[in-house]
Amino acid sequence: MILRDRLKTILKENNLKQKDLASVIGVTESYISAIINGRNDNISQPVAYLIEEKYGYSAQWVLTGAGSKIKQVGKNPNFSNLHKKAIMQIDEMNEQQIRAVLVFIDSLEELERCFKVEFDVDNL
């Protein structure tokens, strides 16, 4: 996968427009456009590291296409890309937002318990 395809992937997976990505990482929209349109096939290391910091994509993957697409987070090397992305997003949250996520997780666990009990009773 070449650089422009990797950038297109980042845009698509994050529902971003070129100008949004450019604004967040501090480059011009024309810089992103030149890469997407194949006029520029290089990206600087500082820009790749900003993409890693802001969106969780490995700077190495952004630069070369090698290695894991998503930056390694947590202790489990077997996390899926979706797990890694969720952890990166949680890492950016304030304490109140994290509490809200935990309440949501607890409600999902409770819902699963309710369905399991209902399912088990139906099979008796």
Image (cartoon, rainbow, N blue to C red):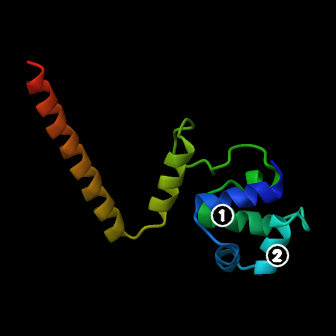
Residue at horizontal 22%, vertical 40%? 112
Q: Which residue is mark 1?
A: 11
Residue at horizontal 88%, vertical 63%? 38
Could one spot residue 48 in this view of the protein? yes
Secondary-structure class at tag 1: helix
* Residue 32 figure quarter: bottom right
Residue at horizontal 77%, vertical 55%? 5
Where does residue 76 sit, x and y in percent of width and height?
52, 38
Q: Nearer the viewer, residue 3 or 124?
A: 124
Along the horizontal axis of the image, is 85 left or right of 40?
left
Q: Nearer the viewer, residue 34 or 83?
A: 34
Q: Height in image: 92 above or below 63?
A: below
Where does residue 70 sit, x and y in percent of width and height?
63, 50
Q: Residues within 10 Å of mark 1 (few under 14, many from 20)?
A: some
Secondary-structure class at tag 2: helix
N-terminal-most mark, 1 or 2: 1
Q: Which residue is mark 2?
A: 31
Furthest residue in direction top, as rendered: 124
Residue type highlighted by circle 2: Tyr
